[in-house]
Image: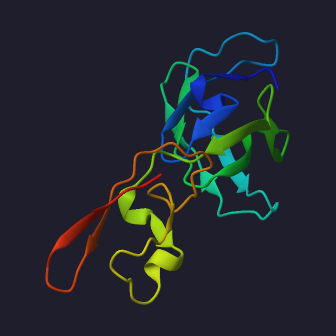
Amino acid sequence: ENCTAKGTGLSDIWFAGKQAKFMVHARDKYGNKRLEGGDEIAVRVLTHDINRKFLPEIRGKVHDNNNGSYTVTYTPEYVGHVTMSVTMKHVVGDEIVFNPVRGSPFELIINPDYIFPLACVPFGPGCEGQLVAGEKTSLTVQAEDKYGNKLITGGDWVECELEAPKGCTIKAEME
């Protein structure tokens, strides 16, 4: 529990698909900085969506800097609420214990990444059946990031082109 973790990867808000990074600093039982590496650190990232359904767990990658500090990276892919546990292995007598670093578990919110056009899904009357020339119709585009996470805010510029049977392309106005 004397060990600490600091860095932007522990921010309250992060984005799907963006690599997060933070440092773990090992300390001895008296709170002194350790000056050599070799410690075992485990990082578990658990995400649940708005329905409190847990999504596949990811593990952080730990790089030993061989000076008592460790660089941890992870890349969340799912949008939701994250609980991240950061623990360090200790041997107490004959028993192996993983103690949490100070502040663990950490709580974060993961937001969607930027719009990814190939993942966007159009739906509505303008996508169903035949369209009639001169008749107004509509469709909605659900914007998603490259991981399939639905974007929660609008405002992205979307261009729509319709392809007619004889090969001509019609540009559509989007609101």
Residue at 51 percent of width and 74 percent of height = 123
Residue at 83 percent of width and 46 percent of height = 94
The answer to whether residue 47 is seen in the rendering is: yes
Which percent across, then down, holds residue 92?
A: 84, 37
Residue at 23 percent of width and 80 percent of height = 164
Residue 162: quadrant of the picture: bottom left
**Image quarter in which the N terminus is found:** top right
Taking the image as shown, residue 92 lies to the left or right of residue 17, namely right
Residue 5: quadrant of the picture: top right
Does residue 139 lie above or below 29 as drawn?
below
The residue sitting at the front extreme is 134
Taking the image as shown, residue 160 lies to the left or right of residue 44, namely left
Does residue 130 lie above or below 117 as drawn?
below
Does residue 120 lie above or below 13 as drawn?
below
Residue at 70 percent of width and 51 percent of height = 80
89 or 24, which lies in front? 24
33 or 21, which lies in front? 21
Residue 69: quadrant of the picture: top right
Which percent across, then down, holds residue 60?
A: 58, 45
